[in-house]
Amino acid sequence: MTFISFLFAACLLAITPGPGLAYVVARTVNGGRQEGLASCLGTSLGGMVHVLASSLGLSLIIAESAMAFNLLKYIGAAYLVYLGIRILRRDEQLDVTPTNGSQGCSRAFTEGIVVESLNVKTALFFLAFLPQFVSPNEPLIAQLVLLGCICVMLNTLVDIAAVFAAHRLIKSDLARTARARLLNRLSGVTIIGIGTFLALTRRET
């Protein structure tokens, strides 16, 4: 029953919009399906960084250290705002060819890792969420890694679904340029909003 509860909660959290989801949609709009999928792989690896950090206790250090928390928080927030502004600045460059703003799968992959790795909210989420579903009678680290991997897998599946949906939407008819610009703007504004919210987040005491 506990595992079912975990899966239900993890699925709800996976479909909640975040910087990773907004980024993969923006990459799909600007660079096509291949770059979108490359960014999904990047965000999944970035999520694994938080899984391993939480399992090894590094997230606990960040949560308890005001200096470490604020440093990671502001770096992550600044990067998200920068990324969102850059996405919005490419808005007018979009045309009916969805790969007009292509920057390469390698860059999409790398930026995906950075976007998710610098999200301090993800680190604190894993730290607060995963321990609620572990058994005290089983090895703790192994359980945390397993549950974290399941969360990352679900998030990645949602990201991939978003990539295919965005790709299909922008190539469906002659209105794809307008749709591409709308998706691009929504992604850029969402990323900036999340970055701003992250910067204003206070560490709970």
Image (cartoon, rainbow, N blue to C red):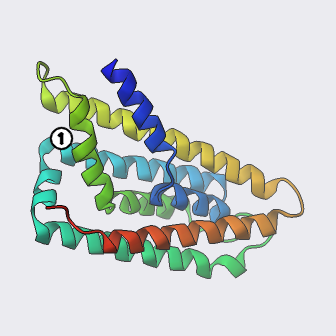
Q: Which percent across, then down, holds residue 60?
A: 13, 52
Residue 34 appears left or right of 45: right
Check disc 1 and report the residue beneath it. Answer: 55
Residue 203 location, quadrant: bottom left
Residue 24 appears left or right of 8: right
Q: Residue furthest front?
A: 205
Q: Which residue shows up at 88% across the image and 57% down it?
A: 173
Q: Which residue shows up at 12% across the image and 72% down it?
A: 67
**Amino acid type assigned to the residue bearing label 1 in the image:** Ser
The residue lying toward the viewer, choosing from 74 and 111, is 74
- Is residue 96 something one can see in this rendering? no
Q: Which residue shows up at 41% across the image and 36% down it?
A: 10
Q: SS of the residue at dot 1?
A: helix
- Is residue 169 something one can see in this rendering? yes
Q: Which percent across, then down, holds residue 8?
A: 44, 30
How many marks on residues?
1
Q: Which residue shows up at 73% across the image and 63% down it?
A: 98
Residue 35 location, quadrant: bottom right
116 w.r.t. 102: above or below: above
Residue 91 location, quadrant: bottom right
96 w.r.t. 45: above or below: below
